[in-house]
Image (tube, rainbow, N blue to C red):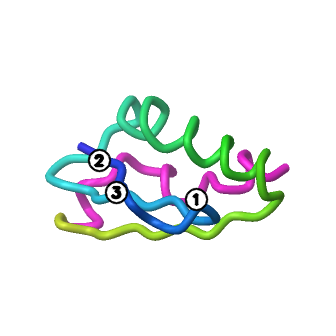
C-alpha cells in the first residue's frame, strides 16, 4: 500500500510505503501526483518513506521513473 504524505512544500511530493506495494498502488496513487507536480514545476522533488522491505515492491516499479519524465 502507498499513502501520499500531506503538508509538504508545494514543490514536493511524498509517499509512505506500507506492507506490499503493488503496481495498482503505484498507478493509482503515485503516478497521477508525480505527473501533476512535473507539469506544474517541470521538476521532481520526491520523498519516499519505506515502512516495509524493498522486497515487498512489485518488480520494476522502482525503475520506472523514466516513463514519467520522458
Closer mark to the observer between disc 2 and disc 1: 2
The residue sitting at 36% across, 55% down in the picture is 6
User: Any mark on residue 3, and which?
Assistant: 2
Q: Specify the label residue 63 is tagged with.
A: 1
* Residue 37 image point, x, y percent: 67, 50
In depth, the one of 50 and 64 nearer the eye is 50
Between marks 3 and 2 in the image, the one whose residue lies nearer the viewer: 3
Q: Mark 2: give few (<14), some (14-19) or many (20+) Cα within 10 Å.
A: some
Q: Residue at x 68, y 43 (%)?
A: 35
Q: Earlier in the sequence, mark 1 or mark 3?
A: 3
Please indicate whether residue 59 sits to the left or right of residue 65 in the image: left
Tell me the CA gap for discs 3 and 2.
6 Å
Q: CA distance from mark 2 to mark 1?
A: 19 Å
Image position of 65 with respect to 45: above or below: above
Q: Which range is magenta?
A: 53-70
- Magenta residue check for 50: no
The part of the image, by quadrant, that contains residue 56 is bottom left
The one nearer the camera, 28 or 21, is 28
Q: Residue at x 40, y 67 (%)?
A: 48
Mark seen at residue 5: 3
Residue 39 position in % (x across, y down)? 79, 45
Marks 1, 3: nearer the viewer: 3
Q: Residues within 10 Å of mark 1 (few under 14, many from 20)?
A: few
Location of residue 44 in the rendering, given as x and y in whole percent from the top left corner: 68, 64
Split into 4 quadrants, where in the image is the N terminus? top left
Mark 2–mark 1 CB contact (< 8 Å): no
Give the structural element (helix, strand or loop) at label 2. strand
Q: Main secondary structure of the magenta part?
A: loop
Is there CB contact under 8 Å for labels 3 and 2? Answer: yes
Label 2 or label 1, whichever comes before in sequence order: 2
Amino acid at each position: 500500500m502507498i499513502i501520499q504524505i500531506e503538508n509538504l512544500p508545494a514543490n514536493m511530493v511524498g509517499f509512505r510505503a506500507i506492507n506490499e506495494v503493488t503496481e495498482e498502488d503505484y498507478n493509482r496513487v503515485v503516478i497521477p501526483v508525480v505527473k501533476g507536480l512535473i507539469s506544474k514545476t517541470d521538476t521532481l522533488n520526491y520523498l519516499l518513506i519505506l515502512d516495509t522491505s524493498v522486497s515487498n515492491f512489485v518488480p520494476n516499479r522502482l525503475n520506472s521513473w523514466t516513463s514519467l519524465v520522458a
